[in-house]
Image: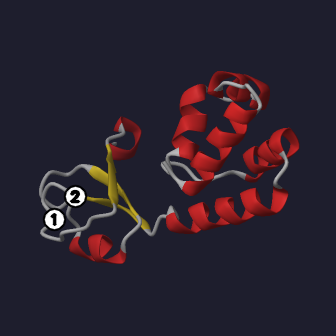
Amino acid sequence: MTEFGKAIRILRIENNRKLKQDAEDFGATASYISAIEHGKKQVSDSYLEYCIKTYGNKDRLTELAKKQNQSTEKIAVIRCKDCKHWLTVIDKDIAESGLCNKHSQLETTKAYEYCSRAERE
């Protein structure tokens, strides 16, 4: 979980709320909110505004959201040279290697694999 996610979780608990409540009030699914809090998706401006309106802490949440968005910024979308899986890549070395986590020789990889029929066609 990211620092932004941890901060929101603490605020949610302090306010006796559930993730599902936030999702419903924000107009998204619980899995979407969870993906943001776990760093799999960037913090949208509208979700950040919702969190600030709901929980306060504008400066702290804005700082954490900015930090998270910088760390999850994708560099490229590539296709693994070996297995042909599509990858969202946030690490320059992975983008240059053209290989997924399974086929990469790099110790630390920052590639998120996904397969999408629409993107493969």
Q: Nearer the viewer, residue 99 or 52?
A: 52
Q: Residues within 10 Å of mark 1 (few under 14, many from 20)?
A: some
In the image, residue 70 above or below residue 17:
below
Q: Nearer the viewer, residue 63 or 104?
A: 63
Whether the residues at callouts 1 and 2 have beta carbons within 8 Å, the answer is yes
Q: Is residue 84 left or right of residue 55?
A: left
Colour scheme shown: secondary structure
Look at label 2 and name its amino acid: Cys
- The residue lying at 24 percent from left, 49 percent from top is 85
- The residue lying at 61 percent from left, 67 percent from top is 67
**Rendered location of residue 34, percent (x, y):** 55, 36
- The residue lying at 16 percent from left, 65 percent from top is 104
Specify the quadrant that holds the C terminus. top left
Look at label 1 and name its amino acid: Ser
The residue pinned by badge 2 equals 100
**Rendered location of residue 7, percent (x, y):** 65, 49
In the image, residue 98 above or below residue 96:
above
The residue pinned by badge 1 equals 104
Q: Nearer the viewer, residue 81 or 12?
A: 12
What whole-number distance in Å separates the C-alpha atoms at marks 1 and 2? 6 Å
What is the total number of numbered labels drawn onto the structure image? 2
Q: Which mark is residue 45?
A: none
**Rendered location of residue 101, percent (x, y):** 21, 57
Q: Is residue 105 left or right of residue 87?
A: left
Q: Secondary structure at mark 1?
A: loop
In the image, residue 21 above or below residue 100:
above
Q: Residues within 10 Å of mark 2 (few under 14, many from 20)?
A: many
Q: Is residue 79 left or right of residue 62?
A: left
- The residue lying at 20 percent from left, 63 percent from top is 99
Q: Quadrant of residue 77?
A: bottom left
